[in-house]
Image: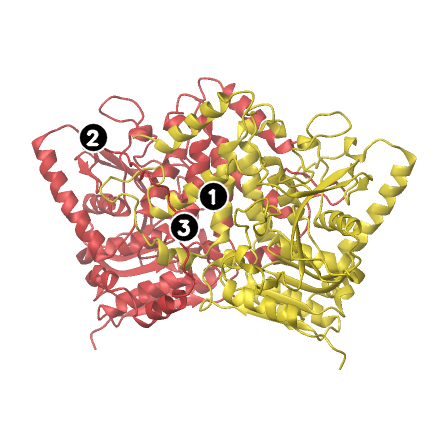
Chain colours: A yellow, B red
Amino acid sequence: MSFPCLDAQEEKTATLQNRSIESGPEPSYTTGKHLVFKNKEPFLLDWGGTLREFDIAYEAWGTLNASRDNAILVHTGLSASSHAHSTATNPKPGWWEKFIGPGKALDTDKYFVICTNVIGGCYGSTGPSSIDPSDGQRYATRFPILTMDDMVRAQSRLLDHLSIKKLYASVGASMGGMQSLAFGVHFPERVGRIVSISGCARSHPYSIAMRHTQRQVLMMDPKWNRGFYYESIPPHSGMKLAREIATVTYRSGPEWEQRFGRQRADPSKPPALCPDFLIETYLDHAGEKFSLEYDPNSLLYVSKAMDLFDLGAAHQQATRKRRAENEKRLLERTKAARDDPSCSLSLPAQNYEETVTVAPMDEKVASAQASGPPADLVEGLKNLQNHPVLVMGVASDILFPAWQQREIAEAIRATGNYKVAHHELGEDVSLFGHDTFLLDVKTMGGEIGKFLAWKDQPA
Amino acid sequence: MSFPCLDAQEEKTATLQNRSIESGPEPSYTTGKHLVFKNKEPFLLDWGGTLREFDIAYEAWGTLNASRDNAILVHTGLSASSHAHSTATNPKPGWWEKFIGPGKALDTDKYFVICTNVIGGCYGSTGPSSIDPSDGQRYATRFPILTMDDMVRAQSRLLDHLSIKKLYASVGASMGGMQSLAFGVHFPERVGRIVSISGCARSHPYSIAMRHTQRQVLMMDPKWNRGFYYESIPPHSGMKLAREIATVTYRSGPEWEQRFGRQRADPSKPPALCPDFLIETYLDHAGEKFSLEYDPNSLLYVSKAMDLFDLGAAHQQATRKRRAENEKRLLERTKAARDDPSCSLSLPAQNYEETVTVAPMDEKVASAQASGPPADLVEGLKNLQNHPVLVMGVASDILFPAWQQREIAEAIRATGNYKVAHHELGEDVSLFGHDTFLLDVKTMGGEIGKFLAWKDQPA
């Protein structure tokens, strides 16, 4: 039996090995020209690491008005750049091209739309592939663990720099939907209204499991080399595998049933262990395309930040306590917290052992459903009790299931907020699963446009 | 940052490297003592390969009656052995221990229960880790592609050997649910009634995608060595990753939400890129446990056979045509068809390009739902029109979603069969997803027992 899929990987490794020194061993992760905000102040992260300085890559569309109160901050998904829409200096279509522009959902005739690349990313913002100013070497896995909250706090520094005191709205989908909420919770006075699409108020174990498998396949690629691959060949095979797994979670079964069914790539040939069915060649292509497009270490850090996301009150309180201790410690010593050798997790000596209890399950579910949104989450979201909030979910989404958006809406309503709109797109509207937010300009774009234009007047 | 999960992998590789020659480089995949049926006749497979001879490992419980008509054949899931229940020679609990026995769902006071290890497997039946009699070497990836239908045809030879003309019932879950249907379709005169649990009548692209990612992570492990690892270190890391992905598909999000929530393995430690949340240590442990328990090549071949499964009439017809041609070819030359160099798939030169059409989706779904089960499938299942059939599905199953079991039931009913029982277990009954068939003795076992005991009398 022959293995063309493995031959292709080996050829690719050989090609990367033979690249000229001028072109550099690492691909360029930037997607084009963008603006850069350089923050020169030290930045303490939630888990105790510090960045001596950081850059934020950003792009903007429309015009900031004289009162500087028409800005909308768009938060991206995991792997997206600041290039949400084409610009004069980078005419390539952006990832939300049809949602932004004159008369569009994010109407640039009315709003000044800003999109950033998150810190931890690789499209111009400071991340693991950036140079650590303390030694002139790339951070790699010396980069500190970071959180969604760190990302939005970094964005708030950009807003200071742009002299924007208060956003008209914070808008995001997927990871951006998490950040959009986080921005409102942590800076309630700096934002007017919130749009959160296909996101969540805290990660749940199923999403963590899916991201765990992606991180594991990447880290198991010997070329990953514990994060120190920048002078060598990037772990393109691990990245390809990680993206294939991610792609499975981005779409839905029923959509694939319609689009690919059981078609084989070449029905005249006998079956093969390498990609064979059309769905397999689709995944193979999606993985291959991404394998050199994004920095592997950024994938690890940003994906980990998503796992750690929790807007519950208990988690916020623990974070505040840790931050206060770290701030004190920072004052006491200049040594960066990230050099602390304790920064690794020891697993319990005892392996996890499954104990199955079938009977009480239905009672537990019934009781969970009866009791409404968790009190800890209601408490954690109370800063949003006066903000108009739009929450959207998609029934066919398996990565951020629709119940997570219902949870957001119910928890915010339970804070006493009467200005929460919640839309759940059924399978009759979209079978595109999680990716619906990239595709459905009509329904999603339509709802966003209406919500942003709505006049919030006192009764 | 330290990486204990990678340290563990490296240590394991070193340990495997240092094993003594006596214990062999490969682990033993057999789970204990079992019976073996040795078939010495050549066996032509659906895709043109041949096995000059094959073994089937099997175990049995209860007593075959004098008229030899009380036998039940139990079909296994992908990675299970013939050890469905403990035996005198192997007292370890079997994978369906609580479903089989005196007074149990498969009542050994009444039935003679047989369970086999599938061909292609590694628990005593002929598979890729077996010796090819033509050269005395292990088959590895020289093993021919095989199908579900090949597996049940091999089982029919075992029944010949046991002088069982007609089974009382064919029973199986997961891959076994596919085989149970296949046995009825291909040998309608050899089986009285059919039980198919959490299976399907043909694989759908989402399941193919999930299995594709498992095969790819395994094949990318350099230790897999294109299947020739038997004299060296088995690809335990790739197997571990594959099993972690599989485990994600075996359970459900809501169950994990209740069981693990957002608990971290050690909340006193800072986060790590290696397993950190409790759900991650659970997956890590499940993967690790399996990594040397099952033959990697068996995983590839059996998983591929699942992808190829399709009981539609068109597929059956194409298979019959191919078999007829291969039988003719076999008569003409003795050279095994598997040496044919054409046995590899060339992908189209053009990569798969996505074209998105949002609008017509809801119409397509509506039309698909309105038209009932596909005519091709109804035609393909017409051999089952007089068999009592029990079909069960689980609402929380994402690998074999409940709609696939509805499809089976509706398609068989559409053949004119009035003896089709269909039960769908809602989330109030089970949140265990696909694995419900291993756990829910009460509901699943209860329904199986009732169905088997039901007296099918002419009206």
Q: Is residue A305 left or right of residue A400?
A: right
Mark 3 falls within which chain?
A: B
Seen in the picture, residue B114 relative to A215 is either above or below; the reply is below
Q: Secondary structure at mark 1?
A: helix
- Callout 3: SS: loop
Q: Amino acid at mark 3?
A: Glu
**Which residue, as the protein is rendered here, is positioned at the far bottom?**
A459
In the figure, B34 relative to B21: above or below?
A: below
> Which mark sits nearer the N-terminus, 2 or 3?
2
Image mark 2: chain: B
Where does the image place residue B32, in percent across and percent down from the top left? 41, 36
For marks 2 and 3, give the CA distance.
34 Å
Depth-wise, is mark 2 or mark 3 nearer the camera?
Answer: 3
What residue is disc 3 on? B354
Three-letter residue code for mark 1:
Glu
Choose top left, top right, bottom left or bottom right for residue A269.
top left
Do the dots labelled 2 and 3 sit on one chain?
yes
Q: Which residue is mark 2?
A: B340
